[in-house]
Amino acid sequence: MDISFWGFMMGLLLLLIPCYYLNFYKTGLVKDTLIGASRMIIQLFLIAIYLEYLFKWNNAWINLLWVVVMTVVAALTVLNRTKLSRSLLLLPALGAFLFSVLFIALYFIGCVVQMSDLFDARYFVPISGMILGNILIANVIALNTFYSGIKRESNFYRYQLGNGATFQEALRPFMRDALIKSFNPTIATMTVMGLVSLPGTMTGQLLGGSSPSVAIKYQIMLMIAIFASSLISVLITLWATRRKAFDTNGLLKDTI
Amino acid sequence: MINYNDITFSYGGNNLFKDFNLNITDNEHVCIAGRSGVGKSTLLNFLLGFLQPEKGMIEVNGIQQSNENIQLIRNQILWLPQDINLPFQNVRELLQFHFQFKVNRKKLYDESKALELFAAFGLDRSLINHEIAQLSGGQKQRIAFIAGILTDKQVYLLDEPTAALDPESTIRMGQFVQSCTDRTIMAISHDEHFQKYFDRTITL
């Protein structure tokens, strides 16, 4: 069932409640909330227009180009949020993201949904988008934890190198921390899924008229695809960026 | 054998080293002394590959230091830095930590030897079951030293190993260093009571 114009306006009215309390407690977040909500509305309406055409054309190259553009934006966002050197790390991060998204999205569409057209816009674009959104969050947490950990505990990092640890061995405790911090939230979400919340994909499919059994199958498969792609992307990003981020003696460059 | 040949290095506009030479023979124990900021720790950082001299060459046991060889040099070294943050839960975890490195994988962790070393350094044996957070700075540094000794390295680099020790513990540390007659030791210390246990002291 479509949402009418007035129904949409009624939905927006709900924003007044958080805005009132954010203002009451002088959080300074009202302006950010309004800007954030406005950007979301405009961006999503633009995407809706774009997707209409994307679905109508259904051209593999255009779909692929769209996913590449989304990946570039995601890689830039991750580096901006982590405040790491964009000039040094953009290419490795971009390569890692692109590989993870394409590998998992095409595996999902080809082997799980078993579509004959792997680049079908209705599947390829939204599934890639969902995977990218989660890759972005996992990578921001992982990169932040990894590089800030090495900077904060540089004494310990050097202590390991100076006592014979190889570069990979000295990085291992920091890799472990990065993986724990970035994947704990996803594991927690999977653990309570269906009990505490009905997840987005499933809710969307139910609202779109799919049967609950189809909806949960998609949800389960997507959660696993998201988990796998996030882990693959984090490992490749850390591996690829560290080749640029450290000097030949294993020390973190000052420019990072 | 450790050789520093014609080392030149400046930092912050100051010439710390100009054609500096130092030769330490096999199993010799050398203490480096000097006021703060004169470049004592810098010498160790050159050897470990954490700093590069502008000019000159460093050699450890016949291996000339370079980007390609730095791992071979680090494999032979026990390095005890002055400030260490040890993110371990307990003392035993720290003692076993070095054995995870590829270079030490064929060696076996020997707890009885660790306890002998605890006694030699005047540490209570029960400390082996303690949490790292419960240790004092001096205890942490001595246990980190013991962790390194267990891996049987040929070259010891000690950076102010007695800075957090009382006089009695300093004597024990000195006696231990003196007893390591089959190890090459380069230490940094401004403690005159500790310096006397070395074959020679070089003041920068």
Image: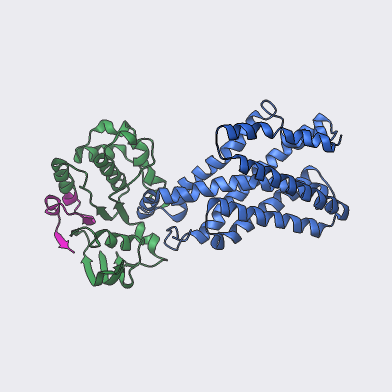
Chain colours: A blue, B green
Above or below, A111 relative to B54? above
| Residue A256 to residue A33: above or below | below
Instruction: Give the x, y percent position of residue A32.
Output: 61, 43
Measured as percent of width and height from the top left, residue A217 is found at: 77, 34
Residue A218, image quadrant: top right
Where residue A43 sits: x, y (%)? 73, 49
| Count of numbered circles in the view | 0
Viewer-proximal residue among A168 and A205: A205
Outermost residue to the top? A195
The answer to whether residue B62 is seen in the rendering is no
- Is any part of residue A34 visible from this angle? yes
Is A175 on the left-hand or right-hand side of A50? left
Tell whether position A62 is magenta: no
Q: Residue at x 23, y 51 (%)?
A: B160
| Residue appearing at x 82%, y 57% in the figure | A60
Q: Quadrant of the N terminus of chain A?
A: top right
**Residue B180 highlighted magenta (yes or no):** yes
Residue B19 percent location from the top left of the image:
25, 74
B27 over A5 or under it: above or below: below
User: What's drawn in magenta, residue-wise?
Assistant: B177-204
Q: Quadrant of residue A137?
A: top right
